[in-house]
Amino acid sequence: MSIFRPEHGYVIGCVVSSWAIHHIYMALSVGKARKTYKVPYPELYATKENCSKEEDRKMFNCIQRGHQNSLENQPIFLALLMSAGVRYPITAAVAGACYLIGRIGYFSGYSTGSPNGRYRLAIVQYAGLLTLIGTCISAAVELVHGTSPLLTA
């Protein structure tokens, strides 16, 4: 008997959605900003040397920073999602979707050129993240105490 159920497909769907959001939507937005604000590769951020207008530097750097921060947080999100998803696939997938909606809000808010815009949908993002942390803790406790249904599968 397999420990996997059809519901685990939702977790995998959330993983693929994370990739699409971080590596297509956000990356294309940064690429478009590079063209708009004329910030050449391999420069990571706009500086006085590669972007003359201060307003343009701020816009590009906010877009780039929003993407960078999202990429910095993606590995822990994926680890939590997959760990929680083994035991609680539907809860993990819903929490993961909330987190990703919050990250889209974070990125789109930051991309306005106002760093305070990144707080858009923050409560949704953190609700998803805290749910994933809680379900991981619950799954770990069940495994340690030998009460997890995963042990009998």
Image: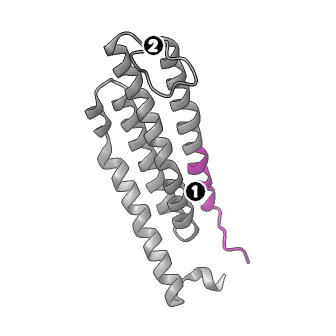
Neighbour class for label 2 at 10 Å: few (<14), some, many (≥20)?
some
Residue lying farthest bottom? Answer: 146
Q: Position of residue 105 (x, y in %)?
A: 37, 36
Q: Which residue is mark 2?
A: 37
Q: Which is in the foreground here, disc 1 or disc 2?
A: 2
- State if disc 2 and disc 1 touch (CB < 8 Å): no
Q: Residue at x 46, y 82 (%)?
A: 141
Residue lying farthest front? Answer: 49
Q: Is residue 5 magenta?
A: yes
Q: Position of residue 125 (x, y in %)?
A: 37, 48
Q: Position of residue 96 (x, y in %)?
A: 47, 53
Amino acid type at circle 1 is Val
Looking at the picture, the colour scheme in use is one colour
- Residue 33, relative to residue 97: is it above or below? above
Q: Is residue 75 magenta?
A: no
Identify the secondary structure beneath mark 1: helix
Q: Residue at x 58, y 32 (%)?
A: 24
Identify the secondary structure beneath mark 2: helix
Distance from Cα at disc 1 to Cα at disc 2? 37 Å
Indicate the quadrant where residue 149 lies: bottom right
Of the pair 133 and 89, the residue shown nearer to us: 133
